[in-house]
Amino acid sequence: MSQSSDLKAFYDEAWGVLERGVADRRSPARHPTFATVSPDGQPQARTVVLRAVSRAERTLEFHSDTRAAKLAALGKTPLAAVHVWHPRHKLQIRLLCEVNVASGEAVRDKWEKVPDMSRAAYGSVPSPGSAIETATSYQHAPVLDQFAVLTCTVGEIDLLYLGDQHQRAVFKRSDGWTGQWVAP
Amino acid sequence: MSQSSDLKAFYDEAWGVLERGVADRRSPARHPTFATVSPDGQPQARTVVLRAVSRAERTLEFHSDTRAAKLAALGKTPLAAVHVWHPRHKLQIRLLCEVNVASGEAVRDKWEKVPDMSRAAYGSVPSPGSAIETATSYQHAPVLDQFAVLTCTVGEIDLLYLGDQHQRAVFKRSDGWTGQWVAP
């Protein structure tokens, strides 16, 4: 990221970073932080893997075990703050998203594209977060029924470039994504 | 981080990573993600700089402009989920914290230790998030009155090691930090 006086270029750069996160396993955007509000109103944050991005539709896709705590959180508050910090670009990307959760037959096509090795992440026994006796007292039993696809529709983007002179802009769906510079 | 069958070692490793974040500007723990709940109940997340850690008191310290959105969030819900993903250690650290905010004369001693260059982060004009005409239409006017110290007292630690065999443990203040293995 270079210093920019152009809102459109700033916006495009951020989507480029997100797209790179899907294509490149080593990109910092590969592993965003996904923040939610728990059913009892507490903040939660965890690393997720960015599976797909659509710049045109302004959506991001993540996968989860249906029994994970974030699904319970999304059941009550279907919003996520998705956060990427890209050290080399000196760029912080913050996305506020509405999250749609799909599972079962509706996501069978995506499930069938998940490599066997990766499927282990969906369907551990006992369920994620259950107390176990030793570090390894669990098995993998991946099944379609425990695979959820989270489609995040971006409503707001807050970009902060931490170069020699910081710059920050906010882009909203409600303003047609034209963007607004704001004080950092 | 290496595979461990010892809860105590797992716990100690995480604190070691956090302490390294204070000492080493290049450590991933230098820049945790700080998630809060906005006054209207939405998830928020942003990068912060880890300023201090006390393993003995189980506290983390961050600094902020008093007018930042996270301070409004903490005024309503004084909790933060602090998140670190350390790629080399393959370790995710999640901390649920109660946050105490101090400002004014109570933090003068800390303010006086903030280098001049860093002070620019506290007291931009107009205030953080205000609409401005161009990317650089703001000034720095650092003053003690706009400097806040956030002391985060950890109540729960959730550690996830993503090695060949994942392992996860939860440590709680309420169980005396003895820890519990849980399914990943």
Image (cartoon, coloured by chain):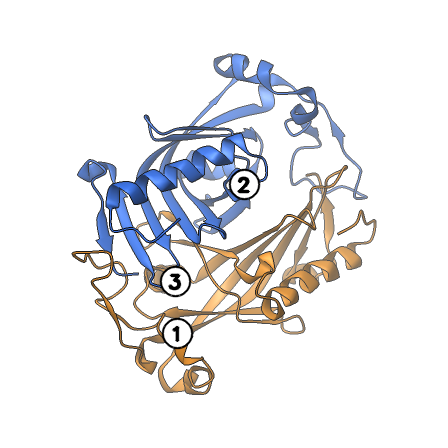
Chain colours: A blue, B orange
The residue that appears at 61% across and 60% down in the rendered structure is B27
Q: Position of residue A155 (x, y in %)?
A: 30, 37
Q: Mark 1 is on which residue type?
A: Ala
Which residue position is annotated with label 1? B148
Foreground: A85 or A6? A6
Would you say A85 lies left or right of A3 here? Answer: right
Q: Is residue A66 above or below residue A87?
A: above
Which residue position is annotated with label 2? A27
Q: Of marks 3 and 1, which one's residue comes earlier in the chain?
A: 3
Q: CA distance from mark 3 to mark 1?
A: 12 Å
Is disc 2 placed on a helix, strand or loop?
A: loop
Q: In front: mark 3 or mark 1?
A: 1
Q: In front: mark 2 or mark 1?
A: 2
Q: Position of residue B92 (x, y in %)?
A: 63, 49
Marks counted in the figure total 3
Q: Mark 2 is on which residue type?
A: Ser
Parent chain of label 3: B
Whether marks 3 and 2 lie on the same chain: no
Q: Position of residue B19 (x, y in %)?
A: 64, 67
Whether marks 2 and 1 lie on the same chain: no
Is residue B100 visible to the viewer in this orientation of the structure? yes
Is disc 3 placed on a helix, strand or loop?
A: helix
Q: Mark 3 is on which residue type?
A: Leu
Q: CA distance from mark 2 to mark 1?
A: 33 Å
Label 3 crowding class (10 Å Cα cut-off): few <14, some 14-19, many 20+?
Answer: many
Q: Residue B115 appears in which quarter of the rendering? A: bottom left
Label 1 crowding class (10 Å Cα cut-off): few <14, some 14-19, many 20+?
Answer: many
Would you say B47 lies left or right of A147 here? Answer: left
